[in-house]
Image (cartoon, rainbow, N blue to C red):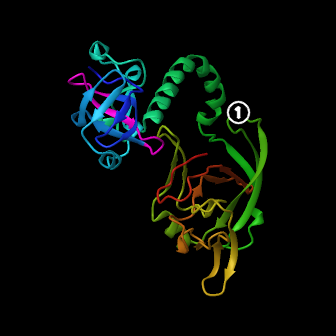
């Protein structure tokens, strides 16, 4: 006779509780353990080898009450119910009254909490059901995020604003931007322009022209190494803060980021601080009348390599 759920459990010396769950071995398809509630003292997992006799209402154990209490506590998350697994005909071997009948959770999945596993499974199923409906909406909302970079030239002022060589001069400008599904907005940005001496140009270009490419690898502009005007993005490569051109008592005139004290010389080279790379040069062209145009670009902060994000 098989044990029944809610049967009383007696030890050699006293009654200890009742059967609350049945655990089956999915390979042998036999009952392997009983889960016994110890009259409010938690649940214990009792192997069938400890069962002496079974009647309609009582399960008699060979162990003492103290020995049963010393058994490891029952861990519900290590088991799943018969409704949550597909083991053919396992019910044919089960002859107990209806209740919670469990089988061990598969070994490879024990690191995943049972309820978390099935909750995640439900979410995945819901995702597949809802995706065809959500796709048009997501496509509309996310389209601006994956739009090609804007490589258009922006007029930002006249080179006559620069009064000295190898000295940073800030140029402010406004441009319209659109973030995801938000309305288009106009924001103020800035770049730093430098009229560089040959020594500074050599540090920046190292004898080679500087090419700028789009996402496909196509060259969109080349800064010539013998053109003295340099444009730097107005964001510090460390964490994207704005920086200033300042007089340093030891280093002389430098670009100084006040957020974390990164310091750069006129060529954009890092002199001190946590910045992982030099200042980011931008495409620049200057007309015969001195009008300055740039292609506005932004790069990922905090990385040694330069990765364009705008």
Q: Which residue is mark 1?
A: 181
Q: Tell me the magenta residue range.
A: 23-42
Against 139, is 240 above or below? below
Residue 282 horizontal/vertical position (percent): 60, 54
Q: Secondary structure at mark 1?
A: loop
Of the 4 image quadrants, the one containing the N terminus is top left
**Residue sitting at x 25%, y 33%:** 51
Q: Residues within 10 Å of mark 1 (few under 14, many from 20)?
A: few
| Residue that protrudes farthest toward the bottom in the picture | 250
Residue 32 horizontal/vertical position (percent): 26, 30
Q: Is residue 166 visible?
A: no
Comparing 263 with 25, the one in front is: 25
Tell whether position 40 is magenta.
Answer: yes
Instruction: Find residue 22 and report its image quarter.
Output: top left
Against 136, is 156 above or below? below
Tell whether position 104 is magenta.
Answer: no
| Residue that protrudes farthest toward the front in the picture | 13
**Residue sitting at x 57%, y 63%:** 238
């Amino acid at each position: 006779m098989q044990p029944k759920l809610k049967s009383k459990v007696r030890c050699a010396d006293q009654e200890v509780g009742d059967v609350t769950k049945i655990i089956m071995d999915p390979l042998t398809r036999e009952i392997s353990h009983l889960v016994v509630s110890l009259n409010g003292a938690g649940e214990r997992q009792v192997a069938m080898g400890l069962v002496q006799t079974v009647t309609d209402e009582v399960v008699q154990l060979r162990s003492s009450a103290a020995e049963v209490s010393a058994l490891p506590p029952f861990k519900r998350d290590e088991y799943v119910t018969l409704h949550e697994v597909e083991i053919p005909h396992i019910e044919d071997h089960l002859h107990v009254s209806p209740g919670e009948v469990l089988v061990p959770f598969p070994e490879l999945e024990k690191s995943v909490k049972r309820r978390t596993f099935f909750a995640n499974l439900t979410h995945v199923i819901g995702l597949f059901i809802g995706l065809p409906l959500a796709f048009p909406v997501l496509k509309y909302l996310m389209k601006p995020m994956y739009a090609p970079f804007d490589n258009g030239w922006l007029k930002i002022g006249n080179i006559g604003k620069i009064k000295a060589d190898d000295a940073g001069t800030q140029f402010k400008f406004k441009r319209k931007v659109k973030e995801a599904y938000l309305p288009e907005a106009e924001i103020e940005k800035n770049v730093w322009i430098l009229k560089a001496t040959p020594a500074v140009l050599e540090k920046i270009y190292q004898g080679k022209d500087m090419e700028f490419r789009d996402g496909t690898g196509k060259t969109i502009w080349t800064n010539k190494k013998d053109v003295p005007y340099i444009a730097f993005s107005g964001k510090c490569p460390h964490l994207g803060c704005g920086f200033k051109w300042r007089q340093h008592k030891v280093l002389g005139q430098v670009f100084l980021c006040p957020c974390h004290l990164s310091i750069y010389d006129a060529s954009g080279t890092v002199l001190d601080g946590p910045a992982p790379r030099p200042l980011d040069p931008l495409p620049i062209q200057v007309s015969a009348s001195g009008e300055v145009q740039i292609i506005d670009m932004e790069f990922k902060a905090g990385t040694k390599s330069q990765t364009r994000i705008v």
